[in-house]
């Protein structure tokens, strides 16, 4: 498809990284972590990245090979990102909480040749997870950060043991540069392909949207997600001062905003409500936060009103792994727009609203949102998925329903995609349903989002138990714990029913279950 480039996007990632390090060598990166804290200079991060590129070449990594990185928001993620780009390889960031089930699928489908993980982090033993993945024919090297290096693995220090004087591998701005997996409407994650051009276009658009402020950024996002990865790449490519958190703690976030005069950040409603609670409790000053974006989950209007009471002009945005930021609000927008819309189109982005056949609906009517723009992904790793996702002319069918209001602000009214957005994490209903149906105590099940003030949405399962079997929230939690799936996908609400609503062909009527869940949530709040 034809692609336009925003300023600075017509080059490779490594060219952008090297340029930023040469121009702003002393720009700071602060990592807030219990295990790997520190304050670092951009030039030092990039220098270690070049050493890591030497280590990759020594491990047999060639241009175009895929390198998986399953790390928290640490300096080492940045180093790996630079080294992978310099070697001409493809960055595959993986969510650090993923277990064997998700890892098996991602590593097998991608054919990743090298994987970088900690030895242990929080409750995860990554060597054990890798063993539980079973046969991974493409994976040749496991690089481990930490003191406990498993037999056959390569230690992080060994990867940085040699200087790199080689030139960056020859790559084109439109070559595959990052592969990120996202949960969507299907049980299996989808591999989303991004090039240097699409990623740098996203970073350029973000900088244009924030051009009126001096940015000191805080990132609460894990780098296995597009939001986290792009925030960390902005430090590397644009030298935007950055404070990282490797795990979420609202009291720490409020403290960091006050201590470092954080001026820009993005949060889910879960993050932001926790920060407000902590600031109220601990007397923290949040006034430096002049650009406070909230998204990745449904945003309660009461949260934005609460922010306004503290002088925070919070606004919303709209995007996805496939098209990272399509619309955004602005702190100067009227309260009504910040309460009810996702803002206006980002620089270079376009949007249509279409019916089932892909034809435009009348202006102001609800339709499926279709987008295109310079940061739109180049396609799925499994190219068989592209046909259903794209319309002629390079338009991406998002699966979301909405319209522009009279002033050109995006209003989201519904989702066609059958997902739950829990605290910013996309959870595929079908995947949860398949795990439930494997439970011998469950005859049938359907999963929908249940509105939640804290998480935005939680996983709610409507379950028909088999005759003579007892099903409870505790029994379902125990079943999921034994599957190796990320615990965030475990249902947090179980509704026992005798039947599920279906149409004449037997298809479960999810819209009825969603309506029931919304009604139950309203009763709970009342």
Image: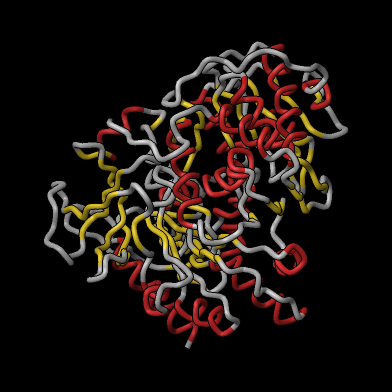
Residue 389 appears left or right of 172: left
Position of residue 470 relative to residue 287, above or below, is above
In the image, residue 284 lies at what x, y percent? 74, 76
In the image, residue 244 lies at what x, y percent? 70, 52
Location of residue 41 (image quadrant): top right
> Measuring 61% from the left and 52% from the top, which residue is drawn there?
221
Residue 392 appears left or right of 29: left
Residue 463 appears left or right of 270: left
Position of residue 198 relative to residue 85, above or below, is below
Position of residue 500 relative to residue 431, above or below, is below
Viewer-nearest residue: 320 or 342: 342
Viewer-nearest residue: 428 or 426: 426
> Measuring 69% from the left and 30% from the top, which residue is drawn there?
116
Can see residue 391?
Answer: yes
Location of residue 58 (image quadrant): top right
> Measuring 61% from the left and 19% from the top, which residue is drawn there?
87
Question: Residue furthest toward the right?
Answer: 147
Query: Where the N terminus falls, by quadrant?
Result: top left
């Amino acid at each position: 498809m034809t692609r336009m480039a925003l300023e600075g996007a017509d080059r490779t990632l490594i060219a952008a990284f090297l340029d930023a390090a040469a121009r702003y060598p002393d720009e700071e990166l602060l990592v807030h972590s219990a295990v790997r804290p520190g304050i670092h200079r951009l030039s030092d991060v990039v220098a270690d990245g070049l050493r890591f590129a030497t280590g990759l070449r020594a491990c047999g990594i060639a241009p175009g090979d895929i390198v998986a990185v399953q790390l928290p928001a640490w300096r080492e993620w940045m180093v790996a990102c630079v080294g992978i780009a310099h070697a001409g390889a493809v960055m595959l960031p993986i969510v650090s909480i993923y277990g064997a089930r998700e890892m098996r699928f991602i590593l097998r489908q991608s054919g990743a040749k090298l994987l970088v993980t900690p030895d242990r982090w929080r409750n995860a033993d990554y060597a054990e997870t890798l063993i539980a993945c079973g046969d991974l024919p493409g994976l040749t090297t496991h690089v481990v950060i930490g003191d406990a290096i498993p037999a056959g693995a390569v230690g992080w220090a060994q990867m940085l043991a040699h200087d790199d004087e080689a030139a960056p591998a020859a790559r084109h701005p439109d070559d595959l540069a990052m592969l990120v997996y996202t949960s969507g409407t299907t049980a299996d994650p989808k591999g989303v392909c991004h090039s240097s051009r699409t990623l740098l276009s996203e970073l350029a658009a973000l900088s244009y949207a924030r051009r009126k402020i001096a940015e000191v950024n805080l990132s609460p996002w894990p780098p296995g997600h597009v939001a986290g990865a792009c925030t960390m790449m902005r430090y590397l490519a644009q030298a935007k001062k950055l404070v990282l958190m490797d795990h979420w703690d609202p009291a720490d976030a409020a403290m960091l905003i006050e201590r470092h005069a954080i001026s820009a950040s993005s949060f889910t409603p879960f993050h932001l409500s926790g920060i407000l609670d902590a600031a109220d409790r601990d007397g923290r000053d949040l006034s430096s936060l002049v650009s406070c974006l909230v998204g990745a989950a449904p945003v309660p209007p009461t949260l934005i009103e609460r922010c306004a009471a503290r002088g925070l002009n919070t606004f919303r945005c709209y995007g996805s792994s496939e098209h990272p930021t399509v619309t955004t609000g602005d702190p100067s927008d009227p309260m009504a727009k910040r309460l009810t819309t996702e803002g206006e189109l980002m620089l270079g982005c376009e949007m249509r609203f279409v019916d089932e056949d892909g034809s435009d609906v009348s202006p102001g009517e609800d339709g499926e949102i279709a987008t295109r723009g310079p940061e739109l992904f180049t396609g799925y790793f499994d190219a068989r998925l592209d046909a259903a996702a794209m319309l002629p002319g390079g338009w991406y069918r998002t699966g979301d329903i909405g319209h522009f209001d009279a002033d050109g602000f995006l209003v989201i009214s519904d989702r066609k995609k059958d997902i739950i957005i829990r605290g910013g994490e996309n959870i595929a209903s079908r995947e949860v349903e398949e795990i439930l149906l494997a439970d011998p105590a469950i005859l049938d099940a359907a999963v929908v989002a249940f509105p939640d003030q804290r998480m935005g949405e939680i996983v709610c399962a409507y379950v028909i138990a088999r005759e003579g079997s007892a099903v409870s929230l505790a029994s379902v939690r125990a079943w999921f714990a034994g599957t190796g799936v990320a615990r965030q996908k475990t249902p947090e609400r179980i509704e026992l029913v005798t039947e599920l609503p279906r149409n004449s062909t037997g298809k479960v009527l999810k819209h009825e279950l969603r309506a029931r869940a919304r009604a139950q949530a309203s009763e709970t709040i009342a």
